[in-house]
Amino acid sequence: MIGEGRQTGRARWRLEVRGAVQGVGFRPFVYRLATELGLAGWVNNSPSGATIEIEGDRRLLDDFLIRLRGERPPACVLTRMDSTPLSPLGESSFAVRSSDEDGPKSAAILPDLATCADCLREIFDPTDRRYRYPFTNCTNCGPRYSILESLPYDRARTTMKGFIQCAACRAEYENPADRRFHAQPNACPRCGPHLQWWDSEGGVHAEGDDALHRAAAALRDGRIVAAKGLGGFHLMVDARDEGAVMRLRRRKRREAKPFGLMAPDFSVVQSCCHVSDAEERLLRSSAAPLVLLRRRSDALVAASVAPGNPYLASMLPSTPMHHLLLAELGFPIVATSGNCSDEPICIDEGEARARLAGIADGFLVHNRPIVRPVDDSLVRIVCGEVMVLRRARGYAPFSLAVVEPLPSLLALGAHQKNTIAVASGSQIVVGQHIGDLDTLLAREVFVRAADDLTRMYELTPQAVVCDLHPDYYSTRHAEKMNLPVVRVQHHRAHVRACMVEHGLTGAVLGAAWDGTGYGGDGTIWGGEFLRVEGDRCERVGHLRAFPLPGGERAIREPRRAAVGLLYEMLGDALFERRELAPLNDFSESERLILRGMLRASVNAPRTTSAGRLFDAVSSLLDLRHYTDLEGQAAMDLEFAVLEDQEESIYPFHLDASGVFDWEPMVATILDEIERGESVGVLAGRFHATMAEIIVAQARRVGESVVVLAGGCFQNARLLTATVERLRAAEYKVYWPRRIPPNDGGISLGQIAAAAALIRRRE
């Protein structure tokens, strides 16, 4: 093969390249490299990536291969390269050929990329022909996934096919020496998309640059603007204006969930937040995600942007339109998803006009169609590593190469934070964040996303994979698809997702901690310990179960989880303890109803959920008895922990069957509350104890590798304490990083679990 012994003489090789090689400037890079080395042949896009035939002196071919790997474009990812020797043809030139459409579709689809430095310079250069053009892009940046209709990635298969390039753009597009060579969204003010400014009734009042100025003026006046971006609409408002932000909250029906913050430049982010070097790199990266940053006490940002939250989810502009708009303003804005609460984001201006009419005072729109909704990604730094909390713009789709061949599978994910995944051959592809499937609109987007991903890869699934929960919409949809259905228990999927992300194949102990998951044994799981090896997954421990009076109401009312927890400990004697904060929050008549529920075990399902245990302790400490958003009580508990406090451990009991009995811990907490210990100290000790439970379980089970998965590990305090304690005890510990620890990773885990099950059956 190439590289053996630095042989001399003429040779020709065919290289099949896999990875993110389409839409990243890979073909012009190959052309320039081959031409510089005096090599002949050709390169094209293929359904599985790119194909190169390269001919010349063997020593130069060796150099070509070394430089191909080492000097590839920044966004290019090479996962595999297979070489085949061919007979030399005596060619003397190198060419870029048209794409090959034949064969199975497996090419990695590149996420949308933030504006590069070269394009940014152009849009602010008065002498450049793209001065202030909000759709400027090149092979190093711009839309990809949001405009792609089918593979391979060519202009005719994107929503740019309706924009005919002018002579100047066509010359760039066809010149291999130009950075816009085969940049599929290439355009300019003469031939490309353009902006319009609409009033709240949809009347057109301005076009082009004037439309952008009108949007900026509206934001300065405290009005709410719906702006069509790269993967959908944002709702925008001046982040400094408390009244404007509260007005957006009322209209959007979003009481407490934090809003995203977009800043004109990095210096403005620094004025609002504490930013580490690693967090700065994330902000400035080609993904340009929302980054969870510690808020500065003197930040000039309205309190209602993130009420009661010490963090601000902040980002820099990711498109030329956003750069131009924020440069006009010079101050940070709220940039939140363009939807009503629980609905998917709008991607079409007509749809936005209908759905956002009661929210937005004006609309900044454009005429480049968006194929699929792609929300903003959300990431944070934990334990010195990047953790993706919502995988969307800049990060989706996610392609993962695996060693063992996979059956053709479609995984439909969970009910909340839904994602879709497909698998075929040696690749798993996870699509973008869809969200919760509670509304009709969300379900329509979910169905389209499932069809979209299978169509994109021309996949005929041999089975569809879903959650074990019979009432999830994703499960019911799987049952209607006329395909064999593989059901995967929720927490097994959590652990499998982390394992496949990290390439773990040996035995592991998985701690799967979240809010709720159907256990299949009549209880609600959520505090599980699973031993996974090969195709087998065994439940080896869990938290002691306790009742949830009111069932699903306990998810929104942590006080109910607290009452259920205390009833499990104290029985009827609980209702004589009027000094307890959660019990006092109920009226006398409500307490009678609760007592009846718990006595008769009616509408009081039992749970092992770690998430509900966090909720219960939050209510016990009088932090939160009601929630407006998922995980709010647990977040309050995390935020209450004092910095740099000594974290002693509460007593707990772990029996021989692996059941963690929390009663000694809760009893001690009650004693400390009565003695007047500070809430911050109690919260810190609780987190430390929960981390120590995992260490104790690892010792009992005897596996050297521990996997942490589930929504509870979004809690930076819990994750950091657990990782530190496990490492101190000399365990190898892994947690989700590229795939969210929450239910956004379930579809990946479903693929891995179903593939293991099918292999065992075969």
Image (cartoon, rainbow, N blue to C red):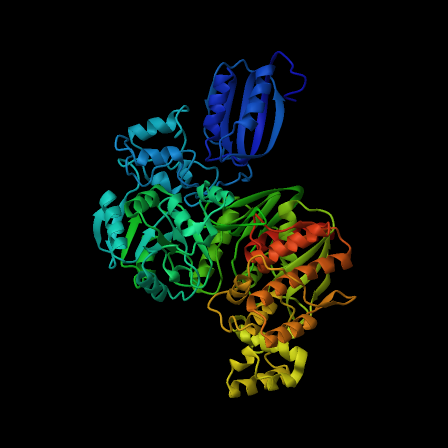
- Residue 480 left/right relative to 536: left
**In the depicted structure, whether residue 563 falls above or below residue 99:** below
Is any part of residue 595 visible from this angle? yes
The residue positioned 34% from the left and 50% from the top of the image is: 228
**In the depicted structure, whether residue 3 falls above or below residue 662:** above
Is any part of residue 318 visible from this angle? no
* Residue 607: quadrant of the picture: bottom right
Number of marks in the image?
0
Q: Position of residue 248 (x, y in %)?
A: 34, 62
Q: Position of residue 538 (x, y in %)?
A: 73, 59
- The one nearer the camera, 634 or 287, is 634
- The one nearer the camera, 85 or 219, is 219
- Residue 566 left/right relative to 100: right
* Residue 582: quadrant of the picture: bottom right
The quarter of the image holding the N terminus is top right
- The one nearer the camera, 335 or 40, is 335
Q: Position of residue 719 (x, y in %)?
A: 61, 55
Can you name the residue that lies furthest to the left here? 205
- Residue 499 left/right relative to 272: right
Q: Position of residue 21 (x, y in %)?
A: 51, 34
